[in-house]
Image (tube, rainbow, N blue to C red):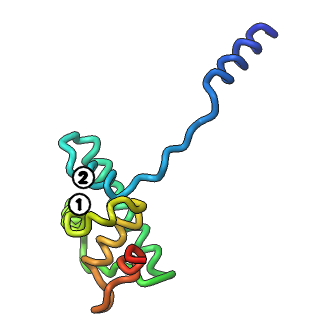
Amino acid sequence: MTRALAIALMALAAWGTPSFAAPPTGYDLYNECTSVNNLDTASCLGYLRGALDGAMFYASLSQPPCPSGVIKAGQLQLIFLRWARENPQFLGRNSLLVAMASFADAFPCKPEKPAAVKELHQ
C-alpha cells in the first residue's frame, strides 16, 4: 500500500501543475471560423452563439448589441468574419470582446458607435 502511494505521488509530481493557456484572441477565433476543419468551424459557431447570448445578458448592464428577429449561428459567423477582416488591428484582443464588438457594430441600439466598439478603441 505504501509503495503504491509513493508511486502515485511520484507520478503526480512528474505530471506537474496544470498550465493555463492565455485566453483566446480575436485572431484565434478568426482562424477557427475560417478553418476547413469541421471541429474548428463548429467551435467557432458555438463560441459566436455563446458570445451573442452573453451579450444579450450583458444588455441589462451596458449598451448591448440589439439584434432583431432570429439570428442563425452561420449569420453570426459571417458578421464576425466581415468585421474581423475590416478591423484586423483588434484581433489581438480578447476574443469575447472582439466578437461582442462585431455584434454591437452589426446590431447597434443607437446610431452612435456601440460601447463594445468604443472599448476596443481605448
Residue 45 position, x and y percent, is 28, 55
> Which is nearer the eye, 79 or 119?
119
Quadrant occupied by the N terminus: top right
Q: Residue at x 77, y 7 (%)?
A: 3
Q: As shown in the figure, which amino acid type bears the numbered disc 2? A: Cys
Q: Secondary structure at mark 1?
A: helix
Crowding at label 2, few (<14), some or many (≥20) Cα neighbours within 10 Å?
A: many
Q: Is residue 8 above or below residue 106?
A: above
Residue named by callout 2 = 33
Q: Residue at x 25, y 64 (%)?
A: 84
Quadrant occupied by the C terminus: bottom left
Residue named by callout 1 = 77
> Which is nearer the eye, 111 or 88?
88
Q: As shown in the figure, which amino acid type bears the numbered disc 1? A: Gln
> Which is nearer the eye, 50 or 31?
31
Label 2 to label 1: alpha-carbon separation: 7 Å
Q: Quadrant of residue 8?
A: top right
Do residues under tags 2 and 1 come within 8 Å of each other at their CB atoms? Answer: yes
Crowding at label 1, few (<14), some or many (≥20) Cα neighbours within 10 Å?
A: many
